[in-house]
Image: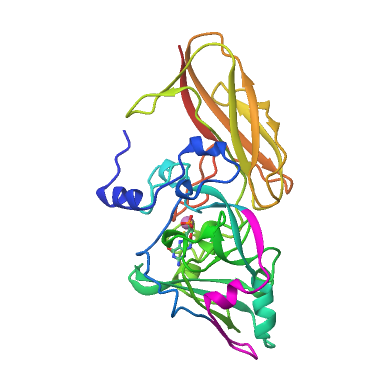
Amino acid sequence: MTVFTLEELQQAARNHGMPLEALRYDVTPVGLHYLLIHFDIPAVDPESWRLEIGGKVARPLSLSLADLRARPSQEVTVTMECAGNGRARLEERPFSQPWLHEAVGTARWRGIPLLDVLDEADVGEGAREVVFTGFDRGLEGGEEQQFERSLTLDDARGDDVLLAYEINGQPLPPQHGFPLRLVVPGWYGMTNVKWLARITVVDEPFAGYQQRHAYRIKADDEDEGRPLNRIPPRALLIPPGTPEFPSRERTVPPGLCLLEGRAWSGFGPIAGVEVSTDGGESWHDADLDPPVSPWAWRGWRYRWEPSTPGAYELRCRARDDAGNVQPDEPAWNVGGYSNNAAQRVPVTVA
Ligand SMILES: Nc1nc2c(c(=O)[nH]1)N[C@H]1C(S)=C(S)[C@@H](COP(=O)(O)O)O[C@H]1N2
Ligand SMILES: [Mo]
Protein backbone atom coordinates (compact mmCIF):
# COMPACT_ATOMS: atom_id res chain seq x y z
CA MET A 1 0.00 0.00 0.00
CA THR A 2 1.24 3.45 -0.89
CA VAL A 3 1.40 5.74 2.14
CA PHE A 4 0.85 9.50 1.82
CA THR A 5 1.87 12.09 4.41
CA LEU A 6 -0.34 14.57 6.26
CA GLU A 7 1.41 17.40 4.35
CA GLU A 8 0.42 15.81 1.05
CA LEU A 9 -3.16 15.41 2.28
CA GLN A 10 -3.13 19.10 3.22
CA GLN A 11 -2.17 20.00 -0.36
CA ALA A 12 -4.69 17.60 -1.87
CA ALA A 13 -7.51 19.01 0.26
CA ARG A 14 -6.76 22.60 -0.85
CA ASN A 15 -6.03 21.93 -4.50
CA HIS A 16 -8.76 19.70 -5.82
CA GLY A 17 -8.79 17.86 -9.12
CA MET A 18 -11.53 17.39 -11.69
CA PRO A 19 -13.52 14.22 -10.96
CA LEU A 20 -12.96 12.06 -14.04
CA GLU A 21 -16.71 11.71 -14.73
CA ALA A 22 -16.57 15.47 -15.57
CA LEU A 23 -14.68 14.47 -18.74
CA ARG A 24 -18.23 14.20 -20.10
CA TYR A 25 -18.48 18.01 -20.52
CA ASP A 26 -16.96 19.79 -23.52
CA VAL A 27 -16.38 22.76 -21.20
CA THR A 28 -15.78 21.96 -17.54
CA PRO A 29 -18.28 23.66 -15.18
CA VAL A 30 -16.26 26.19 -13.17
CA GLY A 31 -16.50 24.41 -9.81
CA LEU A 32 -15.26 21.15 -11.35
CA HIS A 33 -12.14 22.64 -12.99
CA TYR A 34 -8.98 21.61 -11.13
CA LEU A 35 -7.20 24.11 -8.87
CA LEU A 36 -3.55 24.65 -8.02
CA ILE A 37 -2.52 27.41 -5.64
CA HIS A 38 1.04 27.43 -4.27
CA PHE A 39 0.48 29.95 -1.47
CA ASP A 40 -2.81 31.61 -0.34
CA ILE A 41 -5.59 33.02 -2.52
CA PRO A 42 -4.84 36.77 -2.30
CA ALA A 43 -7.54 39.35 -1.55
CA VAL A 44 -7.65 41.86 -4.42
CA ASP A 45 -9.79 45.02 -4.26
CA PRO A 46 -11.25 45.46 -7.77
CA GLU A 47 -11.76 49.22 -7.24
CA SER A 48 -8.15 50.10 -6.53
CA TRP A 49 -6.58 47.29 -8.60
CA ARG A 50 -4.47 48.28 -11.62
CA LEU A 51 -2.47 46.16 -14.01
CA GLU A 52 0.94 47.82 -14.31
CA ILE A 53 2.89 47.26 -17.52
CA GLY A 54 6.47 48.49 -17.41
CA GLY A 55 10.15 47.68 -17.79
CA LYS A 56 11.68 47.98 -21.26
CA VAL A 57 8.71 49.71 -22.85
CA ALA A 58 8.40 53.22 -24.33
CA ARG A 59 4.92 53.77 -22.83
CA PRO A 60 4.27 52.20 -19.42
CA LEU A 61 0.57 51.48 -18.83
CA SER A 62 -1.64 51.32 -15.76
CA LEU A 63 -5.00 49.74 -16.56
CA SER A 64 -8.10 49.38 -14.40
CA LEU A 65 -10.55 46.53 -14.74
CA ALA A 66 -12.97 48.94 -16.48
CA ASP A 67 -10.18 49.92 -18.95
CA LEU A 68 -9.59 46.26 -19.74
CA ARG A 69 -13.27 45.44 -20.15
CA ALA A 70 -13.74 48.40 -22.54
CA ARG A 71 -11.20 46.92 -24.98
CA PRO A 72 -11.86 44.47 -27.84
CA SER A 73 -11.96 41.03 -26.26
CA GLN A 74 -11.52 37.47 -27.47
CA GLU A 75 -12.69 34.13 -26.08
CA VAL A 76 -10.66 30.91 -26.34
CA THR A 77 -11.60 27.45 -25.16
CA VAL A 78 -8.50 25.94 -23.58
CA THR A 79 -7.63 22.65 -21.91
CA MET A 80 -5.30 23.39 -19.00
CA GLU A 81 -3.29 20.75 -17.18
CA CYS A 82 -0.90 20.95 -14.23
CA ALA A 83 2.67 19.88 -14.98
CA GLY A 84 2.50 17.75 -11.81
CA ASN A 85 -0.43 15.67 -13.06
CA GLY A 86 0.46 12.00 -12.53
CA ARG A 87 3.06 12.73 -9.82
CA ALA A 88 1.40 10.53 -7.17
CA ARG A 89 1.86 7.48 -9.43
CA LEU A 90 5.66 7.74 -9.26
CA GLU A 91 7.65 5.43 -7.08
CA GLU A 92 9.85 7.45 -4.73
CA ARG A 93 7.26 10.17 -4.99
CA PRO A 94 8.58 13.76 -4.99
CA PHE A 95 7.03 15.83 -2.16
CA SER A 96 4.51 18.20 -3.71
CA GLN A 97 0.85 18.23 -4.72
CA PRO A 98 0.00 14.50 -5.08
CA TRP A 99 -2.05 14.42 -8.28
CA LEU A 100 -3.22 11.11 -9.67
CA HIS A 101 -4.74 11.98 -13.10
CA GLU A 102 -7.28 14.70 -12.47
CA ALA A 103 -5.32 17.98 -12.66
CA VAL A 104 -7.05 19.07 -15.85
CA GLY A 105 -10.02 21.11 -17.02
CA THR A 106 -11.32 22.96 -20.06
CA ALA A 107 -12.65 26.50 -19.85
CA ARG A 108 -13.83 29.33 -22.05
CA TRP A 109 -11.50 32.17 -21.14
CA ARG A 110 -12.39 35.71 -22.23
CA GLY A 111 -9.92 38.55 -22.13
CA ILE A 112 -7.81 40.90 -24.18
CA PRO A 113 -4.99 39.71 -26.43
CA LEU A 114 -1.64 40.19 -24.69
CA LEU A 115 -0.22 41.23 -28.05
CA ASP A 116 -2.44 44.34 -28.12
CA VAL A 117 -1.19 45.45 -24.70
CA LEU A 118 2.47 44.82 -25.60
CA ASP A 119 2.05 46.80 -28.83
CA GLU A 120 0.41 49.69 -27.02
CA ALA A 121 3.17 49.78 -24.40
CA ASP A 122 5.68 49.76 -27.28
CA VAL A 123 8.27 47.14 -26.39
CA GLY A 124 11.78 48.55 -26.72
CA GLU A 125 14.86 47.28 -28.56
CA GLY A 126 16.82 44.60 -26.77
CA ALA A 127 13.76 43.34 -24.89
CA ARG A 128 13.92 39.54 -24.44
CA GLU A 129 11.29 38.31 -22.02
CA VAL A 130 8.05 39.30 -20.40
CA VAL A 131 7.65 38.63 -16.66
CA PHE A 132 4.19 38.06 -15.17
CA THR A 133 3.87 38.72 -11.43
CA GLY A 134 0.98 37.53 -9.26
CA PHE A 135 -0.15 39.11 -5.98
CA ASP A 136 0.23 35.88 -4.02
CA ARG A 137 3.25 35.63 -1.73
CA GLY A 138 4.91 32.77 0.06
CA LEU A 139 8.03 30.79 0.82
CA GLU A 140 9.19 28.05 -1.51
CA GLY A 141 12.57 26.35 -1.62
CA GLY A 142 13.60 28.65 1.25
CA GLU A 143 12.96 31.77 -0.88
CA GLU A 144 10.29 34.33 -0.12
CA GLN A 145 8.61 35.30 -3.36
CA GLN A 146 5.56 36.32 -5.30
CA PHE A 147 4.45 33.76 -7.87
CA GLU A 148 6.20 34.89 -11.06
CA ARG A 149 6.89 33.33 -14.44
CA SER A 150 8.25 34.62 -17.72
CA LEU A 151 7.77 34.00 -21.44
CA THR A 152 10.13 34.89 -24.27
CA LEU A 153 8.88 37.84 -26.29
CA ASP A 154 8.03 35.47 -29.16
CA ASP A 155 5.98 33.17 -26.94
CA ALA A 156 4.27 36.16 -25.29
CA ARG A 157 3.26 37.35 -28.76
CA GLY A 158 1.92 33.88 -29.62
CA ASP A 159 -1.54 33.11 -30.99
CA ASP A 160 -4.45 33.47 -28.62
CA VAL A 161 -2.39 34.43 -25.55
CA LEU A 162 -4.86 36.32 -23.36
CA LEU A 163 -5.13 38.46 -20.27
CA ALA A 164 -8.37 36.85 -19.10
CA TYR A 165 -11.01 38.36 -16.82
CA GLU A 166 -13.79 35.81 -17.45
CA ILE A 167 -14.16 32.05 -17.25
CA ASN A 168 -17.18 30.36 -18.86
CA GLY A 169 -18.95 33.73 -19.19
CA GLN A 170 -18.54 34.86 -15.57
CA PRO A 171 -15.94 37.02 -13.80
CA LEU A 172 -12.97 34.98 -12.59
CA PRO A 173 -13.73 33.57 -9.15
CA PRO A 174 -11.06 34.19 -6.46
CA GLN A 175 -9.53 30.73 -6.81
CA HIS A 176 -8.98 31.09 -10.58
CA GLY A 177 -7.16 34.43 -10.40
CA PHE A 178 -9.60 37.33 -9.88
CA PRO A 179 -9.45 39.91 -11.34
CA LEU A 180 -7.04 38.96 -14.14
CA ARG A 181 -4.86 36.04 -15.18
CA LEU A 182 -2.63 35.05 -18.05
CA VAL A 183 -3.84 32.26 -20.36
CA VAL A 184 -1.31 30.65 -22.71
CA PRO A 185 -3.11 27.95 -24.73
CA GLY A 186 -1.26 24.65 -25.02
CA TRP A 187 1.17 25.34 -22.17
CA TYR A 188 1.25 23.62 -18.80
CA GLY A 189 -0.72 25.23 -15.96
CA MET A 190 2.11 27.11 -14.20
CA THR A 191 2.48 29.40 -17.23
CA ASN A 192 -1.00 30.81 -16.66
CA VAL A 193 -0.15 33.26 -13.85
CA LYS A 194 -3.19 34.17 -11.71
CA TRP A 195 -3.97 37.38 -9.77
CA LEU A 196 -1.82 39.48 -12.11
CA ALA A 197 -0.27 42.53 -10.47
CA ARG A 198 2.23 43.54 -13.15
CA ILE A 199 3.82 42.69 -16.45
CA THR A 200 7.48 43.65 -16.85
CA VAL A 201 9.43 43.56 -20.10
CA VAL A 202 13.07 42.64 -19.37
CA ASP A 203 16.30 42.47 -21.39
CA GLU A 204 17.79 39.40 -19.73
CA PRO A 205 16.47 35.91 -18.97
CA PHE A 206 14.26 35.94 -15.88
CA ALA A 207 15.81 33.96 -13.04
CA GLY A 208 12.92 33.79 -10.54
CA TYR A 209 12.36 30.64 -8.48
CA GLN A 210 9.40 29.32 -10.50
CA GLN A 211 11.47 29.67 -13.70
CA ARG A 212 14.98 28.71 -12.65
CA HIS A 213 14.33 26.02 -10.05
CA ALA A 214 10.76 24.76 -10.37
CA TYR A 215 9.07 23.36 -13.47
CA ARG A 216 12.19 21.82 -14.94
CA ILE A 217 12.84 18.19 -15.79
CA LYS A 218 15.86 17.31 -13.63
CA ALA A 219 17.55 13.94 -13.35
CA ASP A 220 18.98 14.81 -9.89
CA ASP A 221 19.42 17.81 -7.58
CA GLU A 222 22.62 18.98 -9.33
CA ASP A 223 20.99 18.94 -12.76
CA GLU A 224 20.05 22.39 -14.09
CA GLY A 225 17.30 20.64 -16.03
CA ARG A 226 15.25 21.58 -19.05
CA PRO A 227 12.25 23.88 -18.71
CA LEU A 228 8.73 22.58 -19.15
CA ASN A 229 6.47 24.42 -21.54
CA ARG A 230 3.87 22.70 -23.74
CA ILE A 231 1.60 19.86 -22.63
CA PRO A 232 2.47 16.46 -24.12
CA PRO A 233 -0.45 14.24 -25.17
CA ARG A 234 -2.69 12.46 -22.71
CA ALA A 235 -5.95 10.52 -23.03
CA LEU A 236 -8.15 9.79 -20.04
CA LEU A 237 -11.25 7.62 -19.88
CA ILE A 238 -14.29 8.08 -17.72
CA PRO A 239 -14.14 5.10 -15.36
CA PRO A 240 -17.19 3.03 -16.40
CA GLY A 241 -19.78 1.16 -14.34
CA THR A 242 -20.62 1.51 -10.68
CA PRO A 243 -18.07 2.65 -8.05
CA GLU A 244 -17.89 1.38 -4.49
CA PHE A 245 -17.51 3.92 -1.68
CA PRO A 246 -14.84 4.48 -0.44
CA SER A 247 -12.54 2.15 -2.44
CA ARG A 248 -13.84 3.43 -5.80
CA GLU A 249 -13.47 -0.10 -7.18
CA ARG A 250 -15.72 -0.45 -10.21
CA THR A 251 -18.11 -3.11 -11.45
CA VAL A 252 -19.65 -3.32 -14.92
CA PRO A 253 -22.27 -5.80 -16.11
CA PRO A 254 -21.39 -8.11 -19.05
CA GLY A 255 -22.49 -6.84 -22.47
CA LEU A 256 -21.96 -3.55 -24.29
CA CYS A 257 -19.97 -0.98 -22.31
CA LEU A 258 -19.28 2.29 -24.10
CA LEU A 259 -15.86 3.60 -23.04
CA GLU A 260 -15.59 7.37 -23.43
CA GLY A 261 -13.00 9.97 -22.64
CA ARG A 262 -11.00 12.98 -23.80
CA ALA A 263 -7.54 13.47 -25.25
CA TRP A 264 -5.41 16.60 -25.63
CA SER A 265 -1.94 17.84 -26.52
CA GLY A 266 -0.35 21.28 -26.44
CA PHE A 267 1.88 20.33 -29.38
CA GLY A 268 -0.87 20.02 -31.98
CA PRO A 269 -4.12 18.26 -32.81
CA ILE A 270 -4.79 14.77 -31.48
CA ALA A 271 -4.06 12.27 -34.26
CA GLY A 272 -5.42 9.16 -32.57
CA VAL A 273 -6.50 7.45 -29.38
CA GLU A 274 -6.11 3.74 -28.65
CA VAL A 275 -7.83 1.69 -25.99
CA SER A 276 -6.76 -1.55 -24.33
CA THR A 277 -9.05 -3.73 -22.24
CA ASP A 278 -6.38 -6.29 -21.34
CA GLY A 279 -3.88 -4.14 -19.46
CA GLY A 280 -1.99 -3.07 -22.58
CA GLU A 281 -1.53 -6.46 -24.33
CA SER A 282 -3.60 -5.36 -27.32
CA TRP A 283 -4.72 -1.92 -28.49
CA HIS A 284 -7.72 -0.79 -30.57
CA ASP A 285 -8.48 2.52 -32.28
CA ALA A 286 -11.13 4.69 -30.64
CA ASP A 287 -13.49 6.91 -32.66
CA LEU A 288 -12.66 10.61 -32.33
CA ASP A 289 -15.19 13.44 -31.99
CA PRO A 290 -14.56 16.75 -33.78
CA PRO A 291 -12.24 19.00 -31.70
CA VAL A 292 -13.98 21.43 -29.31
CA SER A 293 -11.42 24.15 -30.23
CA PRO A 294 -7.84 24.13 -31.56
CA TRP A 295 -6.65 24.41 -27.94
CA ALA A 296 -9.07 22.02 -26.27
CA TRP A 297 -9.43 18.31 -25.71
CA ARG A 298 -11.13 15.98 -28.14
CA GLY A 299 -13.79 13.45 -27.17
CA TRP A 300 -13.37 9.78 -28.11
CA ARG A 301 -15.31 6.55 -27.66
CA TYR A 302 -14.80 2.81 -27.95
CA ARG A 303 -17.40 0.02 -27.81
CA TRP A 304 -16.27 -2.69 -25.40
CA GLU A 305 -18.33 -5.87 -25.12
CA PRO A 306 -16.97 -8.02 -22.32
CA SER A 307 -18.74 -11.37 -22.17
CA THR A 308 -16.60 -13.18 -19.61
CA PRO A 309 -16.90 -12.13 -15.94
CA GLY A 310 -13.62 -11.35 -14.19
CA ALA A 311 -11.00 -8.69 -13.60
CA TYR A 312 -9.92 -6.39 -16.44
CA GLU A 313 -7.55 -3.48 -16.76
CA LEU A 314 -8.64 -0.70 -19.12
CA ARG A 315 -6.01 1.61 -20.61
CA CYS A 316 -5.97 4.42 -23.16
CA ARG A 317 -3.26 6.41 -24.90
CA ALA A 318 -3.16 9.34 -27.31
CA ARG A 319 -0.78 10.54 -30.00
CA ASP A 320 -0.62 13.99 -31.57
CA ASP A 321 0.09 15.37 -35.03
CA ALA A 322 3.61 16.33 -33.95
CA GLY A 323 4.41 12.62 -33.40
CA ASN A 324 4.34 12.62 -29.58
CA VAL A 325 2.99 9.43 -27.99
CA GLN A 326 2.18 8.53 -24.40
CA PRO A 327 4.64 6.19 -22.71
CA ASP A 328 3.55 2.91 -21.19
CA GLU A 329 5.31 3.51 -17.87
CA PRO A 330 6.17 6.70 -15.90
CA ALA A 331 9.58 8.37 -16.27
CA TRP A 332 10.97 9.67 -12.96
CA ASN A 333 12.38 13.18 -12.45
CA VAL A 334 13.15 15.27 -9.33
CA GLY A 335 9.96 17.38 -9.46
CA GLY A 336 7.70 14.53 -10.54
CA TYR A 337 6.55 16.46 -13.60
CA SER A 338 4.97 15.47 -16.87
CA ASN A 339 4.08 11.87 -16.02
CA ASN A 340 1.76 11.13 -18.93
CA ALA A 341 2.06 7.33 -18.78
CA ALA A 342 -1.08 5.68 -20.17
CA GLN A 343 -3.92 5.52 -17.62
CA ARG A 344 -4.89 2.21 -15.96
CA VAL A 345 -8.46 1.62 -14.75
CA PRO A 346 -9.12 -1.73 -13.10
CA VAL A 347 -12.73 -2.95 -13.42
CA THR A 348 -14.59 -6.13 -12.54
CA VAL A 349 -17.12 -7.55 -14.97
CA ALA A 350 -19.83 -9.21 -12.87
N1 LIG B 1 -0.23 33.62 -9.13
C1 LIG B 1 -0.29 32.29 -9.29
N2 LIG B 1 -0.57 31.78 -10.50
C2 LIG B 1 -0.65 30.45 -10.69
C3 LIG B 1 -0.39 29.55 -9.63
C4 LIG B 1 -0.12 30.10 -8.35
O1 LIG B 1 0.07 29.37 -7.37
N3 LIG B 1 -0.08 31.46 -8.22
N4 LIG B 1 -0.42 28.19 -9.87
C5 LIG B 1 -0.11 27.81 -11.25
C6 LIG B 1 -0.28 26.39 -11.50
S1 LIG B 1 0.99 25.40 -10.97
C7 LIG B 1 -1.33 25.89 -12.21
S2 LIG B 1 -1.39 24.26 -12.58
C8 LIG B 1 -2.43 26.77 -12.65
C9 LIG B 1 -3.77 26.27 -12.14
O2 LIG B 1 -4.81 27.10 -12.58
P1 LIG B 1 -6.27 26.89 -11.97
O3 LIG B 1 -6.15 26.78 -10.48
O4 LIG B 1 -7.07 28.04 -12.42
O5 LIG B 1 -6.77 25.59 -12.56
O6 LIG B 1 -2.28 28.11 -12.20
C10 LIG B 1 -0.95 28.60 -12.25
N5 LIG B 1 -0.95 30.00 -11.93
MO1 LIG C 1 0.60 23.25 -11.84
> At 39% from the left edge and 25% from the top edge, which residue is drawn?
249
Residue 322 location, x and y as percent?
73, 49
Closer-to-camera residue (72/85)? 72
Q: What span is in magenta? A: 52-77
Most distant residue in the left direction: 6
Quarter of the figure with residue 159:
bottom right
Residue 14 location, x and y as percent?
34, 53
Most distant residue in the bottom direction: 58
> At 44% from the left edge and 22% from the top edge, which residue is drawn?
242
Residue 271 location, x and y as percent?
73, 40
Q: Is 47 contained in the magenta span? A: no
Q: Is 54 contained in the magenta span? A: yes
Closer-to-camera residue (73/21)? 73
Judge whether 283 appears above or below 291 on screen: above
Judge whether 255 appears above or below 167 on screen: above
Quarter of the figure with residue 67:
bottom right
